[in-house]
Amino acid sequence: MGFASHAGFLAVLLATWEWAARMGLLDPTFFGNPAGIISFLWANFVQGTHLWIELGWSVMSTLLAFISGSLAAVLTGLIFVIFPRLERFLDPYFSALNALPRIALAPLFILWFGLGIGSKIAMGFTLTFFIVLSSTVAGMRGINQDHIVLTDTLGASPRQKFFLVTLPGAIPVIFSGLRLGLIYALLGVIAGEILAAEHGLGQQLAYLASTFNMNGVMALLVVLAWLGMAATSGMTRLERHLLRWQ
C-alpha cells in the first residue's frame, strides 16, 4: 500500500468523523472532532510553544529512562551469560520484580524521587530493563556454536570472539528488545506523568481530560502516537546501519 492509499484512507476517516460529529451522531464532548483537534495542534504547537516545552520534558525523561535501563540490562545480561549460576540464583527474584505491576510502584517512586523527572525515569527504567535484559541473554546464547568453534580453532582470544562473533551475532535479537524497551520507556514515563507530575505531556493529558477538553486529549494522543512511531523507525534505521555489513 502506497502513500496515496494511506492518505486517502485517513482523509475518508477524518471526513466521516467530522461529519458524524456535526450531525450529532458522535458527541464532541466525548470524542472531539478533527477540526477542533487540528485547531488545538495549530494553536499550541505552531502559534504557541507551551506544549513543545512539555514534549521536551517527556522526551528527555524517556531517553534517560531508556538509556539507563538499556545499559544496566545489557551489562546484567553479559554477567548472566558469563556466570550462569548467578543467573539461576537471581532468576526467582528478577521474575518476582518483573511480575510487579509498574503502576503499583508509582506511589513509591513518587515518594522516593518526588514529583519531578526522577520518578518518571524510574518508571520507564523498570519497564525497559527487563525487556532488554531478556533479549540480551537470548541474543548472546543464540549464537551459532559452529562460529565459536571456528574462532577457537583459529586461535581467537576471548575479546576477539566477543567483539567479532558474539556481539555482532546478537545485535538483531538485542535490537528487537531495544525497540520494545524504548516504547515501554515512553509508556512508563507518560503513565507516571498522568498520575502525578509537574511537567510533561502526560500531565497535560490528565489536565485536559479532567476539563473535558477532548480535542486537546485527542491531539496529544496523536502526538504520542507519532512520537512512538518515530522512535520505532529511528531504532530500525540504527539497526540497519549497524548491520549493513551483513
Image (tube, rainbow, N blue to C red):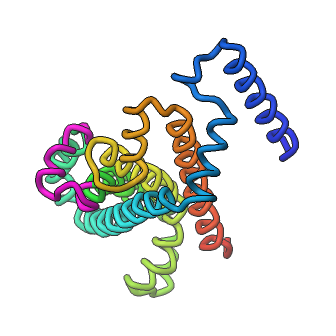
Residue displayed at 61% across by 48% down: 41
Q: Nearer the viewer, residue 78 or 189?
A: 189
Residue displayed at 29% across by 54% down: 198
In the rendering, at what x and y percent does residue 233 appear? 62, 58
Does the magenta segment cover residue 109?
yes
Q: Quadrant of residue 215?
A: top right
In the rendering, at what x and y percent does residue 58 appear? 41, 58
Any part of residue 3 in sight:
yes
Q: What is the count of numbered marks? A: 0
**Residue 235 in the figure: left or right of residue 85:** right
**Residue 129 in the figure: left or right of residue 87:** right
Q: Nearer the viewer, residue 100 or 52?
A: 52
**Residue 184 in the figure: left or right of residue 73:** right
Against 227, is 67 above or below? below
Magenta region, mostly helix, strand or loop? helix
In the rendering, at what x and y percent does residue 123 appear? 28, 51
Residue displayed at 59% across by 66% down: 239
Q: Quadrant of residue 199?
A: bottom left
Q: Quadrant of residue 39?
A: top right
What residue range appears in magenta?
101-119
In the rendering, at what x and y percent does residue 183 appear? 47, 51
**Residue 162 in the figure: left or right of residue 102:** right
Quarter holding the N terminus? top right
Against 117, is 246 above or below? below
Against 97, is 53 above or below? below
Q: Nearer the viewer, residue 111 or 141?
A: 111
Residue displayed at 51% across by 65% down: 171
Quarter holding the C terminus? bottom right
